[in-house]
Image (cartoon, rainbow, N blue to C red):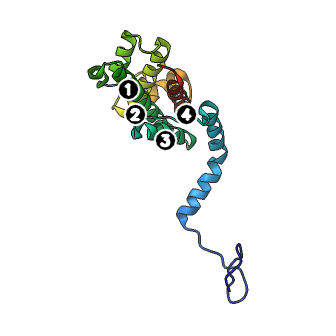
Amino acid sequence: MPKAKGASEKDMFGHPVRKRVDKYERMLAKSDKETFASRVERLKFVDGIIGNIGMLGSMETVFIFREAGWAYINGAFISTIMLSQAFIERRLHDLMFEKGFESEAKHGAQSIIKFCRKNQLVSDFLLDKFDRLRQIRNPFVHVKSSDHPFSLDQRMFTEKIQPNDLIENDAKEALSLMYTLLLTRL
């Protein structure tokens, strides 16, 4: 006879059989429990700024957009910064391509930002923020000395903030910029 749903297995003496939980399942369960409240707060932030807005674009762009939000929710702040920067660079590239600047669009983030500024394709306010995000991202992508102005060491010292808080704030700002660019008519 099949067991009823939720019924536990019993040993030959009628005692419940305790199932062994894999050590990796225990580790993840512990992590889930410890980070649950923080993840809920970050999910509320993401939902509050983007809601149910979807986006169209290349598959890479769509996945970058989606994963940037999930990275932030799950506390992968450096990943959030890098993915947000990648999304912004792709959107600016697409804008330049649409405007007929195909060859200029093939350059890196710094050149794209300079070109957009020179040709007034995007507001200086947003371009300043995008460029700052690029500078914050650079020490994670390119080897920089600890005295580089955008290294975590230097920013911790000058901004007087702990590194975890610093990169979480940076990630939050990066996501906000990414979503702003998505919603801004270019």
The circle drawn on residue 42 is: none
Callout 4 touching callout 3 (CB < 8 Å): no
* Residue 66 image position (x, y, % from top left): 50, 40
Callout 4 touching callout 2 (CB < 8 Å): no
Name above or below for residue 14 compared with residue 100: below
Callout 4 touching callout 1 (CB < 8 Å): no
Q: Which badge, 1 or 2, comes first in the chain's sequence?
A: 1
> Which one is in front in this view, the residue at disc 4 or the one at disc 1?
1
Q: Amino acid at mark 4?
A: Glu
The circle drawn on residue 67 is: 3
Q: Which badge, 4 or 1, comes first in the chain's sequence?
A: 1
- Quadrant that contains the N terminus: bottom right
SS of the residue under disc 1: helix
SS of the residue under disc 2: helix
Name above or below for residue 5 compared with residue 43: below
* Residue 118 image position (x, y, % from top left): 36, 10
- Residue receiving disc 2: 140
- Residue receiving disc 1: 94
> Which one is in front in this view, the residue at disc 3 or the one at disc 2?
3
Q: Amino acid at mark 2?
A: Phe
* Residue 16 image position (x, y, % from top left): 71, 79
Of residue 167 and residue 96, the one placed in the foreground of this image is 96
Name above or below for residue 31 compared with residue 41: below
- Residue receiving disc 4: 168
Q: Residue furthest right?
A: 14
Q: Within 10 angstroms of label 2, few (less than 14), some, or many (20 or more) residues?
A: some
Query: In the visual, does 86 lie left or right of 173?
Result: left
Residue 74 image-quadrant placement: top right
Residue 50 image-quadrant placement: top right
